Amino acid sequence: MRAGSTATWGRGLKPARFAYHAPNSLAEALSLLARYAGEARVLAGGQSLIPMMNFRIATPSAIIDLNCVPDLDYIRHEIDIVRIGGMTRQRKIEFSGVIAETLPLLRDAIKLVGHLPTRSRGTIGGSLAHADPAAELPMILQVLEGEVVARGAAGERVIKAGEFFRSPLTTALTPEEILIEVRFPVMPGNAGYAVEEFARRHGDFAICAVAAVLVREGERCVKARLATGGTGPVPLRLKAAEGVLERKGLGGASIEEAAEMAARTVEPMRDQNGSVEYRRHLTRVLTGRALRRAAEGRPR
Ligand SMILES: Cc1cc2nc3c(=O)[nH]c(=O)nc-3n(C[C@H](O)[C@H](O)[C@H](O)COP(=O)(O)OP(=O)(O)OC[C@H]3O[C@@H](n4cnc5c(N)ncnc54)[C@H](O)[C@@H]3O)c2cc1C
């Protein structure tokens, strides 16, 4: 085989050369990130970063492995807030009694993220920081109005879900910040909720996903929250559709109107998985399904 073709082979299979660091503290991790001035990436579960490096979509000069940094893996319930450490594995969230009790929509959605082996390594912080437009957890951060805590050399800042996702694979985090915590308000005990997804196979990224939370008082809907993933560059709150439900209630006609509004609001991408019209159609159908299930209300 000619030398040139060997080189071409190698490029697609193995990552480019990089330095590896495994700091034992957050302070050390932050100082390493600062030293590499935007050229390093942190490693969490590696379920997205390592494939990207192998395909040389990402070619960082250095990897700062967070797996030896203590105190980033926890789930804490404090009155009306649940705090989840950035390095908490998706599987730990899936089986947490606290999450089942306080954030059942997150528990339902996380079952749709990849497969058992990927959830065993993948972290909540990694999924949010990676910001794949078709990922489920960014959509859940939006619909539950969560926020993330970022730590950098200058200290900590809190970023609300609506300000976090900027474009595909891009968030408000700077290259020198680490996502250390995710915060969710506890879901109201009487909330109805549902997540609906269309994917080619179970465990695949969503071609379209919709999550809904509804709080009703008698016939009135006092709070509606709807978000979608897979239908645009970033996960989106469907505020116009929420408004329809809060004004008109949860009858069949207003659910249909909200689903139609959701389909008109999204700005889908066209790719090998479907056309713009197909994704609008999925948005309409899945929004209707999610709302009907959420409106039935499911006791916890
Ligand atoms: C076969 C397969 C199927 C999958 N299916 C799905 C799916 O259906 N839905 C889905 O949502 N995902 C899916 N994934 C991706 C998976 O959920 C990943 O776990 C997730 O995208 C990234 O989490 P991670 O912890 O592995 O992060 P990593 O891969 O380690 O990191 C991802 C990116 O985030 C950055 N990062 C990680 N942690 C932090 C942090 N704390 N602070 C700042 N930056 C950080 C990294 O530098 C990197 O750029 C799949 C992956 C595989 C391999």
Image (cartoon, grey):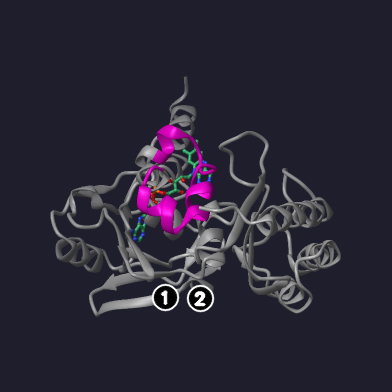
Total labels drawn: 2
- Residue nearer the viewer, 205 or 168: 205
Q: Quadrant of residue 230?
A: bottom right
Q: In the displayed structure, does residue 49 sit left or right of residue 206?
A: left
User: How far apart, in angstroms, are the residues tagged by discs 1 and 2?
Assistant: 6 Å
Residue 147 locus on image (x, y percent): 43, 71
Q: In the displayed structure, does residue 32 sit left or right of residue 228?
A: left
Residue 164 locus on image (x, y percent): 48, 71
Identify the main secondary structure in magenta: helix
Residue 42 position (above or below residue 16): below
Cβ at disc 1 under 8 Å from ligand 1: no
Residue occupied by mark 1: 159
Residue 158 position (above or below residue 270): below
Element on which disc 1 rests? strand
CB-based contact (under 8 Å), mark 1 and mark 2:
yes
Q: Is residue 102 magenta?
A: yes
Residue 60: mark in rendering:
none
Residue 286 position (above or below residue 260): above
Q: Is residue 234 magenta?
A: no
Cβ at disc 2 under 8 Å from ligand 1: no
